[in-house]
Image (tube, rainbow, N blue to C red):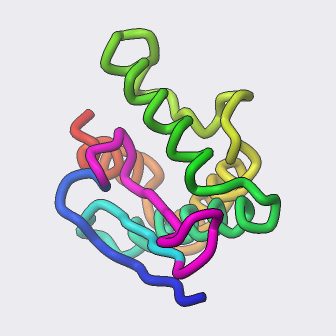
Amino acid sequence: MRIIFRTVDGTPFNLTTCGYWRFNEPLNHGDLEIYISRMADWRHRLAVNGHELIEALYCKLRGITTEECDRFDWQTEEEIALGQRDPNVEPGFDPKCPYRWGHIMGSWWERLVITVTFASWRRYDKACNEAMGL
């Protein structure tokens, strides 16, 4: 398995997120592709890339497929579009989210990176929101 990191303009696959991962073959086989929104500060990119990597590997280890995660993500997008979900609340923290614990661990990574690289959490949060158009 190769791990491929990609930077995109806007949000990955028009999702309300600044990071997205997928295995490029069904059932978490093939290469792992990680997509993140373009951000100026390398520390912010490191935080998002690490978050996505941790989340993806957690899912692979637990047998939670890209397809399951995508179903949840697209359902979330539909709820946001219908005004049933606040786009400022990360769906990864939802108890129904299949990748919830991977998301939580990825969030710990983000906090660690922002802290140890002396970045500003406020600026990081702002950069993520700007990338998502929030």
Residue 61 falls in image quadrant:
bottom right
* In this rendering, position of residue 43 left or right of residue 100: left
* In this rendering, position of residue 49 left or right of residue 1: left
Pick the front one: 71 or 3: 71
59 vs 79: above or below: below
Q: Is residue 15 visible?
A: yes
Please state, as top left, top right, bottom left or bottom right, where the C terminus lies in the image.
top left
Q: Position of residue 132 (x, y in %)?
A: 28, 43
Q: Position of residue 116 (x, y in %)?
A: 59, 72
Please state, as top left, top right, bottom left or bottom right, where the N terminus lies in the image.
bottom right
Residue 94 falls in image quadrant:
top right
Pick the front one: 90 or 71: 71
Pick the front one: 35 or 117: 35
Q: Is residue 100 magenta?
A: no
Q: Is residue 25 magenta?
A: yes
**Residue lying at 27% horizontally and 64% vertically, measured from the top left:** 39
Q: Position of residue 42 (x, y in %)?
A: 35, 76
15 vs 84: above or below: below
Pick the front one: 92 or 119: 92
Furthest-bottom residue in this view: 2
* In this rendering, position of residue 28 left or right of residue 9: right
**Residue lying at 33% horizontally and 75% vertically, measured from the top left:** 6
Instruction: Identify the magenta region.
Output: 13-31
**Residue lying at 24% horizontally and 45% vertically, measured from the top left:** 130
Furthest-right residue in this view: 62
**Residue lying at 32% horizontally and 42% vertically, measured from the top left:** 129
Q: Position of residue 15 (x, y in %)?
A: 34, 43
